Image (cartoon, rainbow, N blue to C red):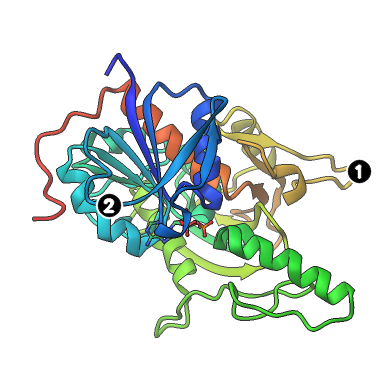
């Protein structure tokens, strides 16, 4: 592998795909060769990488021959459709979709939290859900110091979580409303501009949407804390990019805000953003394009002696998706984890 890694991006033309491309270049990932894969719709277009225009190809059975690493961000059904071909071709797939996240054979990795889990991969490593990654980065350093007993999170999720088309739709809707026209909605079920709605993923029999269930189950898996009590309410808000989350934590004993701040000030991937005098705290506009999760408004929960409140914002496309995937790829290079013996995932 010292010659570099043969990389393919599946979903290269999407919101996360283009960010993956930028990160491979800016983080100087050792790319030996690069294939950009998308649907037939994009075949023949090009995307820039290191000063060259690389052609986008329609994904096919032959796409993964000679490839070491596939960074996949083309949705769950596309990941499911190609995973077997990718693994059988001998490549490692870092999958940004939800297709394999809860598969017991598939590590679910946030490098700042559970890098050791990557070593057990059998060809696929899953990148967690965006809101889960952002929350994990802010909350795990506290959990490691003292186990969290109960976690209550409310999210304020931007359009970027639903892809490039949804971001464009939000802009078009805003223009329509400002022109006194009726906005139309296709990427989302309802107009998002000047509005908000509970996350539109499917609901289960308990009344939780899929996004909320992902936060609950994935956090337990990443933290290796199957008993952790978590509840979530996920809401889509008319922000273009970067998600926000209000988190309430309960511990077995009091956790002073000062101590929490000290831990978070030196936690990997976290930037403490608090100016109490100016009433300035993390905002999506400041988190956009940044690698760190911005955390602030850390305060005692006045309703519970062992409770702590915090607020966070993080770029959903970067740390919530593309950056985390590239960090996993960097971990594979660093730990020489491209070699593996068997794949039980498809057995
Ligand atoms: P394309 O641009 O050709 O449709 P986003 O999350 O921003 O909506 O991006 C989704 C990405 O997944 C795009 O690159 C899109 O390619 C790609 N994609 C969607 N469906 C398929 C498919 N069936 N096969 C391959 N790539 C797909």
- Percent coordinates x, y for residue 226 in the rendering: 32, 56
Q: In this view, does 19 lie to the left or right of 337?
A: right
The residue drawn where x is 31% and y is 15% is 3
- Percent coordinates x, y for residue 274 in the rendering: 78, 40
Q: In this view, does 188 lie to the left or right of 240?
A: left
The residue drawn where x is 28% and y is 44% is 63
Q: Is residue 233 left or right of residue 62?
A: right
Which residue is label 1 attached to?
278
Residue 261, compared with residue 224, is above or below; it is above
Residue 329 found in image quarter: top left
Residue 315 — which label?
none
Q: Earlier in the sequence, mark 1 or mark 2?
A: 2
Quadrant of picture, ligand 1:
bottom left
Q: Quadrant of the N terminus?
A: top left
- Percent coordinates x, y for residue 120 in the rendering: 21, 38
Residue 196, compared with residue 166, is above or below; it is below
| Cβ–Cβ under 8 Å for marks 1 and 2 | no
- Percent coordinates x, y for residue 105 in the rendering: 20, 50
Q: Which residue lies furthest to the front in this view?
A: 44
Tell me how far mark 1 sits from mark 2, CA to CA: 55 Å
Between residue 42 and residue 299, name the one nearer to us.
42
Residue 60 — which label?
2
User: Does residue 149 appear anywhere in the picture?
Assistant: no
Q: Which residue lies furthest to the top in this view?
A: 2
The residue drawn where x is 67% and y is 43% is 295
Residue 304 found in image quarter: bottom right
Could you tell me which secondary element the residue under label 2 belongs to?
A: loop
Residue 181, compared with residue 304, is above or below; it is below
Between residue 13 and residue 305, name the one nearer to us.
13
Q: Is mark 1 within 8 Å of ligand 1?
A: no
């Amino acid at each position: 592998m010292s010659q570099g890694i043969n990389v393919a991006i599946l979903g290269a033309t999407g919101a996360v795909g283009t960010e993956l491309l930028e990160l491979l270049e800016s983080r100087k990932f050792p790319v030996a060769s690069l294939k950009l894969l998308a649907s037939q719709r994009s075949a023949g277009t090009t995307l820039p990488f290191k000063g060259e225009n690389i052609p986008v190809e329609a994904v096919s059975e032959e796409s993964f021959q000679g490839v070491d690493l596939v960074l996949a961000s083309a949705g769950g059904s596309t990941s499911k459709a190609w995973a077997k071909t990718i693994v059988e071709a001998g490549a490692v797939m870092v999958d940004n979709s939800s297709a394999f996240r809860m598969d017991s054979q598939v590590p679910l990795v946030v490098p700042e939290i559970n890098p050791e889990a990557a070593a057990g991969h059998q060809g696929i490593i899953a990148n967690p859900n965006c809101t889960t990654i952002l929350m994990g980065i802010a909350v795990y350093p506290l959990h490691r110091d003292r186990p969290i007993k109960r976690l209550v999170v409310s999210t304020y999720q931007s359009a970027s979580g639903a892809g490039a088309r949804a971001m464009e739709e939000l802009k078009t809707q805003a223009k329509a409303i400002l022109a006194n026209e009726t906005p139309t909605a296709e990427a989302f079920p309802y107009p998002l501009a000047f509005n908000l709605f509970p996350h539109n993923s499917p609901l289960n029999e308990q009344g939780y949407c899929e996004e909320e269930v992902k936060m609950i189950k994935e956090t337990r898996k990443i933290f290796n804390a199957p008993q952790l009590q978590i509840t979530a309410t996920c809401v889509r808000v008319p922000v273009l990019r970067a998600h926000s989350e209000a988190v309430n934590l309960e511990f077995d004993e009091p956790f002073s805000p000062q101590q929490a701040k000290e831990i978070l000030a030196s936690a990997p991937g976290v930037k403490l953003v608090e100016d109490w005098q100016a009433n300035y705290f993390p905002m999506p506009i400041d988190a956009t394009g940044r690698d760190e999760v911005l955390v602030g408004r850390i305060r005692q929960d006045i309703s519970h002696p062992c409770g702590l409140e915090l607020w966070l914002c993080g770029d959903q496309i970067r740390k919530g998706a593309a950056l985390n995937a590239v960090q996993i790829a960097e971990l594979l290079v660093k730990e020489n984890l491209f070699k593996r013996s068997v794949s039980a995932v498809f057995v």
